[in-house]
Image: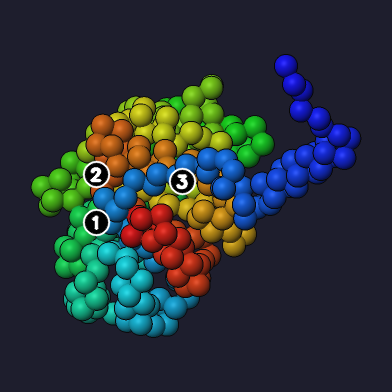
């Protein structure tokens, strides 16, 4: 058997070639040539419309509601959620006309606290929302009276009985709204996940309240509170009829999908849960930034389009 000669020079040449090939493969632009690319996240496609909570653009909406709503429509949003009285003294008929001109739907209305649902006030609220075409009336902040919140320990001095009483008030309200073709919902903040003898206030509330009351799961606030959004929706299936789409640990200018968005890796699973009728049962996504600006909305709309969600 003849053995081919292989000199030290040949060995060094082969080693150099191998090293060069390895170095080339390690370059960012060439990694895909030598290794299978990581699969792209699956965001689930465009199955649910996106709206905007107008608190996100409170400044321009207050001074130029017509232009603001036209801009949101041009970006591809299908609706808006109101948070306050209409700007500049505009009445409900005027606001409805602006919505209609821009092909937008009123998808919700944050009315403040339960005190705004008193008899006379409730009647005016129903009439206003019937005119603008909205069927969802929401309470937007912590409602159990007398409790203080410890953000480090995630505890509250509110009692389980207080939260159950609030739930009963919501249930009574839902009964009043149902004949009008309307429903009520409660919007969460991190404080709503404070523990009372080991149980989250949010869970106490939704275990007690009528199923006609739905949850507005603020996906950002949940993430900030360390809550698994998907697991929480599974506890109360089909009741996350609207959700607020925002980054976890936000409030400092970060955007949905930014590298510092605490929900970044979870968005595919969250969207899938929302769009599963047996889990979230979500009817509309609502983009919100606390103290946001139109620039944030524009940049996020571009990202949502890249993800195939708009």
The alpha-carbon separation of the residues under discs 2 and 1 comes to 9 Å
Is label 3 in a helix, a strand or a loop? loop
35 relative position to 25: left or right: left
Label 3 crowd bin: few (<14), some (14–19), many (20+), radius 10 Å: few
Towards the viewer: 114 or 197: 197
Residue located farthest toward the left when viewing the structure as drawn: 179
Label 2 crowd bin: few (<14), some (14–19), many (20+), radius 10 Å: many
The mark nearer the N terminus, 2 or 1, is 1
Residue under pointer 2: 173
The mark nearer the N terminus, 3 or 2, is 3
95 relative position to 180: left or right: right
Towards the viewer: 285 or 146: 285
Q: Position of residue 258 (x, y in %)?
A: 56, 55
Is label 1 in a helix, a strand or a loop? helix
Indicate the quadrant containing the N terminus: top left, top right, bottom left or bottom right: top right
Residue under pointer 1: 122
Q: Position of residue 297 (x, y in %)?
A: 45, 67
Residue located farthest toward the top when viewing the structure as drawn: 1
* Number of marks present in the image shown: 3
Residue under pointer 3: 40
């Amino acid at each position: 058997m003849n053995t081919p000669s292989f000199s030290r020079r040949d060995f060094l040449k082969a080693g150099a070639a191998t090293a060069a090939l390895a170095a080339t493969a390690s370059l960012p632009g060439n990694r895909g040539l030598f290794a299978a690319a990581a699969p792209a996240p699956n965001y689930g496609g465009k199955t649910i419309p996106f709206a905007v909570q107008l608190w996100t653009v409170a400044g321009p909406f207050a001074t130029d509601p017509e232009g603001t709503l036209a801009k949101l429509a041009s970006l591809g949003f299908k609706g808006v959620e109101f948070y306050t009285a209409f700007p500049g003294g505009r009445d409900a008929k005027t606001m409805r006309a602006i919505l209609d001109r821009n092909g937008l739907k009123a998808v919700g209305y944050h009315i403040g606290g339960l005190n705004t649902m008193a008899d006379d006030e409730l009647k005016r609220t129903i009439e206003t929302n019937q005119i603008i075409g909205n069927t969802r009336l929401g309470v937007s902040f912590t409602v159990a009276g007398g409790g203080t919140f410890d953000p480090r320990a995630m505890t509250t001095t509110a009692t389980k009985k207080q939260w159950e009483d609030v739930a009963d008030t919501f249930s009574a309200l839902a009964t009043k709204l149902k004949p009008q073709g309307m429903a009520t919902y409660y919007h969460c903040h991190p404080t709503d996940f404070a523990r009372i003898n080991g149980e989250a206030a949010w869970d106490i509330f939704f275990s007690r309240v009528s199923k006609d009351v739905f949850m507005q799961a603020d996906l950002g606030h949940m993430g900030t509170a360390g809550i698994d959004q998907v697991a929480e929706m599974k506890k109360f299936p089909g009741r996350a009829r609207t959700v607020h789409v925002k980054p976890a640990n936000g409030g400092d200018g970060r955007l949905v999908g930014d590298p510092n968005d605490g929900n970044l890796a979870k968005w595919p699973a969250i969207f899938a849960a929302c769009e599963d009728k047996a889990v979230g049962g979500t009817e509309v996504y609502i983009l919100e930034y606390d103290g946001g600006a139109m620039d944030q909305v524009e940049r996020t709309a571009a990202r949502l389009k890249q993800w195939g969600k708009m």
